Amino acid sequence: MIKSYTSFLDTTLTPHHLLNSLKVLLPEYNVITSFNSSMSPGKYILVKNTSFYLLDIPKGKIKGCKIIATHNDSPVMKLKPNFRDPKSETGAKNGYEELSLSFYGGGIWHTWFDRPLGIAGLTITENNEKIIITDDSSIVIPSLPPHLNDGSVYNKGFHYRPNFKGITKIGNIDGMINEKTISHDLMLYCLEKAYVDQKKQICLFK
């Protein structure tokens, strides 16, 4: 069961990836985009924007229903809508560019420092085409050396530093964002894969 869970984590990088994962986990469910009371008995995945509803309609007269709710989001770092700083000279000098980040939820953010991160999520084009993104271009959020870190990040939280940035090579994300992109919901994820230590029976990363 643990191996199945780690495999699920490796493929379901964001809520936008969840539908594809559900198709694999629940092949007996049919994907639909609308619902009405005259639908035939069966199992369905109702898709509404980025929300999903699992419907199990039994045969015969329905006397009642059960509703079970959950959520598929979690603390994460995201690229800001305008994540490129036109005033930054970092890229022009060293072949790297800075990406402005925002923070969703209450994550243990310092664990994201100094490790390879990828980008995943959703982009929407001017033709309303929705594209699921999974990209392993390496992004790094460098930690500050002790003589520059006054503890404010850890003591007061990351909202104390609203202009926090990641660094990547110029051109790494050009294939995801272009002139046809009108909106995006792109998040960072850990490139290290989860695996199970059978002796210790714990989930680790490598």
Image: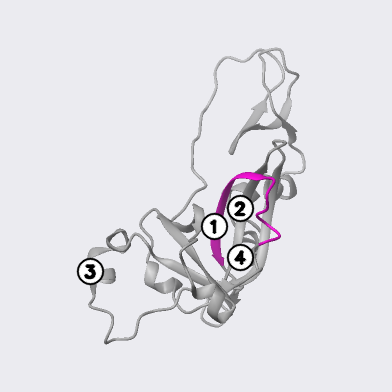
The amino acid type found where label 1 is placed reads: Met
The amino acid type found where label 4 is placed reads: Thr
Which residue in the structure is indicated by mark 2? 121
Residue lying at 61% horizontally and 65% vertically, measured from the top left: 6
Residue lying at 65% horizontally and 50% vertically, measured from the top left: 17
Give the alpha-carbon distance from disc 1 to disc 3, as whole Å: 24 Å
The amino acid type found where label 2 is placed reads: Gly
Please tell me which residue lies in front, 67 or 105. 105
Q: Earlier in the sequence, mark 1 or mark 3?
A: 3
Vertical comparison of 8 with 21: above or below: below
The local crowd at label 1, few if under 14, some if 14 to 19, many if 20 or more residues have their Cα within 10 Å, is many
Residue 57, visible in the rendered structure: yes
SS of the residue at dot 3? helix
Marks 2 and 1 in Cβ contact (< 8 Å):
yes
Q: Which mark is residue 155?
A: 3
Which residue in the structure is indicated by mark 1? 187
Which residue in the structure is indicated by mark 4? 6
- Left or right: residue 121 compared with residue 112: right
Q: Earlier in the sequence, mark 3 or mark 4?
A: 4
Vertical comparison of 175 with 123: above or below: below
Give the alpha-carbon distance from disc 2 to disc 3, as whole Å: 30 Å
Is residue 126 inside the magenta stretch?
A: no
SS of the residue at dot 1? strand
Q: Earlier in the sequence, mark 2 or mark 1?
A: 2
Instruction: Give the magenta-colored segment's residue range.
Output: 174-189
